[in-house]
Image (tube, coloured by chain):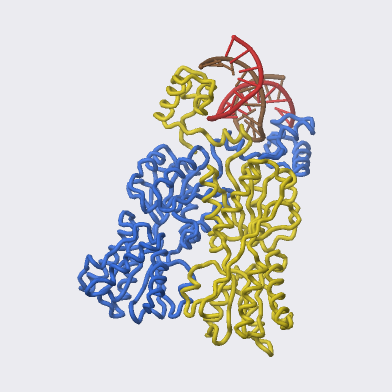
Chain colours: A blue, B yellow, C brown, D red
Amino acid sequence: MKFEAVTIKHIAQELGLSTSTVSRALRDSHEISAATKKLVLEHAKKVGFKPNRIAQSLKERKSLSIGVIVSEIANSFFSQVINGIESIAYSHGYTVIIAQSMESADRELSNLEYLTSSSIDGLIISVSAETKNYSYLKKLHERGLPIVFVDRAIDDIETHKVIADNFKGAYKATKHLIQKGYKRIAILSNNSSLSISQERLDGYRAALQEAKIPVKENLITYCDHGGMIYAEVENAMKTLLKQRIKPDAIFAGSDKITTGCLKFMKQKNIRTPADLALIGFSNTDLTELLNPPLSVIRQPAFEMGQASASLLLSLIESKKLHTKFETRIQSTELLIRKST
Amino acid sequence: MKFEAVTIKHIAQELGLSTSTVSRALRDSHEISAATKKLVLEHAKKVGFKPNRIAQSLKERKSLSIGVIVSEIANSFFSQVINGIESIAYSHGYTVIIAQSMESADRELSNLEYLTSSSIDGLIISVSAETKNYSYLKKLHERGLPIVFVDRAIDDIETHKVIADNFKGAYKATKHLIQKGYKRIAILSNNSSLSISQERLDGYRAALQEAKIPVKENLITYCDHGGMIYAEVENAMKTLLKQRIKPDAIFAGSDKITTGCLKFMKQKNIRTPADLALIGFSNTDLTELLNPPLSVIRQPAFEMGQASASLLLSLIESKKLHTKFETRIQSTELLIRKST
DNA sequence: TTGTATGCGTTATCAG
DNA sequence: CTGATAACGCATACAA
């Protein structure tokens, strides 16, 4: 900050003490007399002293701050995750530094370099859909940076991963559609290189196979940026609807894809479920207000954020980030609503 | 970060140079020979040198980071604002530190104290609905901390304020309801101590007065936490609907209040606009997908975030934060949709 | 063109 | 119990 802040030195001068005495008094050291402590503490409060965290960080080699990289803040799933992270971090005296990759591997890398130039104690990341080369991230981890993955993880890096049960979510959603009598269930998947996409596809396939419905490859489409670009969804839908035998139900593989589908269907005047059934991942609470309300798979985003932050803080404090590695899975709920 | 990072000192030793030479070479100083520069730069790249931002901050007395305090991250309006802020900050090499007040004055103060302990170069804040005492904020500003208000400002503090045209937005929305023939238009306002609430109420009153419709105080209700607590909205709605002469239209004064109203009406099976018309502030794109689509007043949240960040950065760089003070108003759009 | 010394604010070590 | 001093990593005024 530009403005003149009160430092330990000022207090020391004004009180005729040494900086070390003041420092110790402020930290409530046992080797300082009660009288001096009282004097220093009262004066410090009076002049509004706040220890300079930057100087503390430099000395202690930690910053009491954690970095968070998500694909997009203005995405209800991620904003809820961040909310959870912030709530835990706040209660432990940590600052949260936010960056967004906008699904770009370049931006992700640049954010990574920036955040890790000795200014964060740990990192929570949901990798971008575009990321193929994670050697930099891996190197950071090997060099000792505590990392926790949330939602989108990299299997190669052995650390905590906080992921919803994507397989089960997708399985249940698909099964639900099957039970409703739908036979030609198409899926608009997120980028195929993401682990969550694979898990969701697996769940989708499993449900179909269980019902002895053949998995048709032409009913599987991909939105490489997770629907962040509406045209992706539009193209996928158009392709699907152009086929000789059209799908009778759609399974949307991400939050943005779900809203994209809704938008598309609205535009084309395709009613759900009458003309085409729709189900998808979604974390916005407005889906229940639609008419008819939309059944969705909701991820426990807030809780996932909280879990990631707790795990990260424990990694930071224990410093044993390679020894006890575990994956936490939190379950996803399928919210069945009238429409689908 | 815990792991051993490469410092200037290491490079200097390995190259048999002094730290100052290395430092200057890295900063491309003109007083360093091309040969040395090349040597240093190449070696630095090879060993993956990243300047320690904490040390730089301590030295330069600035941190290249800005603090952001909003009431709640997982609120579409604010997450869009943050998105805008981050996009500008990123392109200027600044880090964004996020904190949320959850509409609590206490949390706001504690966040403020934390962020300003010499670790941010400037602050963008949307004050909490609960905040009455802003003396701490004012003191910070007087002591030289660059501040920009976004959406919710404090008039007393003379600095940039990025605010949508709330008066016009509310005026247009109310006028629209009047033109549709509604006569008993109720308003669910945000906390009355917020400037935006007053502006919106003024717009509401102006439209009514222009149409010679008397302003009835019993049609004006307040949700003190801006609808963050659903019970607030529920109570307000129940109160309104219990009156002898019920309102025929509702004007919701914030994002959360709007969704709260939608939820309430859904629960009680009150159709809009058939039973009760609804219009409100909202920044979620799902409102257009409702059936019928909901007319809303949308704030240019992303742009407001961008504007705040630009203004803040100019304040930080010019350092003349008290000399040229101005308020930027960005207009709000009223999205007229089928339903209302 | 390069090196030496100093300080940013804090804490820790070592004396006193 | 308290004080002087060094150190964290970097940048710069001052010497050379």
Q: Is residue B293 visible?
A: yes
Which residue is more in the foreground, A281 or A57?
A281
Q: Against A78, is A55 above or below?
A: above
Q: Is residue A306 visible?
A: no
Quadrant in which the N terminus of chain A is drawn: top right
Measured from the top left, where is residue B92 in percent x and y? 54, 43
Residue A275 falls in image quadrant = bottom left
Residue B296 falls in image quadrant = bottom right
Q: Is residue B290 left or right of residue B316?
A: left
Which residue is depicted at the point 60% across and 68% down? B228
Measured from the top left, where is residue B143 in percent x and y? 74, 43
> Going by the picture, which residue comes out furthest to the bottom?
B244
Q: Against B328, is A50 above or below?
A: above
Which residue is more in the foreground, B64 or A146?
B64
Which residue is depicted at the point 46% across and 17% down? B16
Quadrant in which the C terminus of chain A is drawn: bottom left
Tally of numbered tags: 0
Q: Is residue A77 left or right of residue C9?
A: left
Residue A44 falls in image quadrant = top right
Q: Against A200, is C6 above or below?
A: above
Q: Is residue A157 left or right of residue B14?
A: left
Measured from the top left, where is residue A312 in percent x and y? 47, 49
Measured from the top left, where is residue A117 in percent x and y? 49, 38
Which residue is depicted at the point 24% across and 71% down? A243
Which residue is more in the foreground, C1 or A145?
C1
